[in-house]
Amino acid sequence: MKQVLCLTLAAGLSLTNLFGQSPTSGKITYEGMRQIDRSQMRMVINGQEVRPGSPGAPDAPEGTPEVMSFTQKLVFSGTMAKEERDRPQNMMMTRTVGGPDGAGSPGGGDRPRTTRRTPPFEQQTYLDLANRQHIDVLTVKKDSTTQVYRSEKPMPEATDWQTASKTKKIAGYTCQKATATRRKQPYTIWYTTELPFTYSPVADLTPPKGVVLQIESDTESFKATGVSTEAVAETAVQPPKDAKVVSADELEEMRRKGMADFRQKMMQEGGFQRRGNN
């Protein structure tokens, strides 16, 4: 009976809580939610880019989501870690109403057709936990060639981090409450010091010490649904060694240019485009 009880507890609790040891490799799974900023949306009508709801422009198409839900994982091994998401970053959506002659889509009248597109580049985030470094890797695909770039910068910390006396359990770990602001928005944060590194799924709100397991504001939230202790190969969380090292500003400029080119292509193909008579 004692063996069965121990196995049951081990399935539900972290190794830290059972044996007083911190895991050296594993995964933290977060369920995330982010409100879609409609002020950043653009529609293409007859080749012209307009903001939904602006003078002379229609509102965003019916059925356009208000929030985006996703899963994010932090995979860690030793002193390195990597963020993984269940959907590509920078994904854009095209929504076409009507056929090219204004007669409606075949068999569907004016029913909108939605297609999701991803840009021709991929961005990944790695973390050097020992040196508190944030490593961005950008893989750019153009024609038949692939270029890989990387930049490093210190993990940013919240400038107005305030702790509170409240505590609660999240994913088996004792967390302390804190508050901070980001882009003038207040955040409520719950973090634990029972894991052997420092991390936050919202990079700008990294605590002085500890791992954020829950964080929320009026526009986004992350909550850890599980912390698993499992073997993770060190090579799985190491950035590519052949990546060209560039500055953070250079990497951001390449990403911006890639997104601008991608948006231009989307405009030509019809991102949120209404064809035919309006």
Image: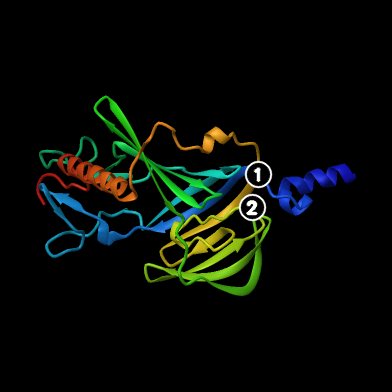
Q: Nearer the viewer, residue 116 or 186?
A: 186
Q: On the image, which quarter does residue 91 sit in?
A: top left
Whether residue 181 is visible, yes or no, is yes
Task: Return the disc, 2 or 1, that comes first in the chain's sequence.
Answer: 1
Three-letter code for the amino acid on which mark 1 is drawn: Thr
Q: CA distance from mark 2 to mark 1?
A: 8 Å
**Relative to 207, is 26 above or below?**
above
SS class of the residue under badge 2?
loop
Which percent across, then down, holds residue 27? 59, 44
- Taking the image as shown, residue 99 lies to the left or right of residue 128, namely left
Residue behind mark 2: 196
Which percent across, then down, holds residue 191? 59, 62
**Relative to 185, is 17 above or below?**
above
Three-letter code for the amino acid on which mark 2 is drawn: Pro
Which quarter shows the N terminus? top right
Q: Nearer the viewer, residue 246 or 59?
A: 246
Marks 2 and 1: CB-CB under 8 Å? Answer: yes
Residue behind mark 1: 24
Q: Which mark is residue 271?
A: none
Which percent across, then down, holds residue 199? 54, 55
- Outermost residue, right side: 1
- Taking the image as shown, residue 218 lies to the left or right of residue 169, namely left
SS class of the residue under badge 1?
loop
Which percent across, then down, holds residue 73? 52, 46
Q: Nearer the viewer, residue 86 or 188?
A: 188
